Amino acid sequence: STQSTWDIDLPKQDKTSNFSYYKVAASTSGGNDVITTFKRLRFNPITLMVKTYDYTFASSEGGAITYYWNGQRKLLLTDIPYATARGCSGWDGMTGRANIDLRDTPFSVKSQFALFGCRPQGHVETPNDYSQLLSSKYLNLYGDGYAGRLTPILDRSRIEDPRGNDHNDEDVNGGWVLQLQWSADMRIEDEIQLGILENFGF
């Protein structure tokens, strides 16, 4: 049977929440910085998997061209997937940033995160004053490298693994996913909605 795709409304919608950002680095890229902000997320209600590369309810500004270390390829970036912090400044700093803000939704993040690309670096942060519950609903991501990125660990594509010394391992819109889970702070109306899904076999 065909799996349904639903939308998650994101109450926090601005350039400081639910965004992904790529900063142009003079030595390895050209054009303008790219920021993509998300108003809703497309997800599968059966698996609770988000399509992070779906830009139906997203808006982007800027456009960057990133050049690969071996000079054999360049890539035009006009959108950055959700939950993806990517950069191309080498080790100059964590220039790639992203934010996940699922507060006021019945979901939290289940995915772990990993580094991909050429000589990647990055990390995940949560505010120090947040409880363990909120720490899985609000995450700041930082990533960089030489075409490096920090993404959900399930973000793997058929060309993700570098062959030999060739790190041109860009995704081809085939593996961008973020695993969610039902949050412990679900409201009663959320529980009713979950019951409806279960009654329909989800």
Image (cartoon, helix red, strand yellow):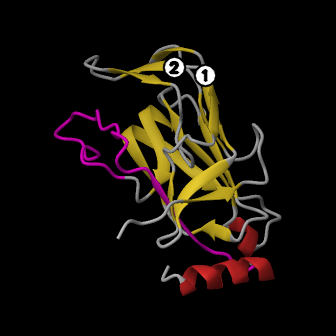
Answer left or right for 142 relative to 133.
left
As measured in the structure, the alpha-carbon distance from the residue carrying label 1 to the one carrying label 2 is: 6 Å
In the image, is residue 161 part of the stretch drawn in magenta? yes
Taking the view exactly as shown, the residue that stands out farthest to the right is 129
Q: Is residue 138 visible?
A: yes
Whole-percent x, y for residue 69 in the image:
33, 23
- Considering only order in the chain, which callout, 2 or 1, is on the residue closer to the N terminus? 1
Q: Is residue 84 left or right of residue 11?
A: left
Please report the bounds of the magenta region as a residue range.
156-185
- What residue would you read off at disc 1? 33
Between 125 and 44, the residue placed more toward the observer is 44
Q: Label 1 is placed on what type of residue?
A: Asp
Q: Which mark is residue 64?
A: 2
Magenta segment main secondary structure: loop
Q: Is residue 173 left or right of residue 37?
A: left
Visible in this render: residue 187?
A: no
Residue at 58% from the left image edge and 79% from the top image edge: 197
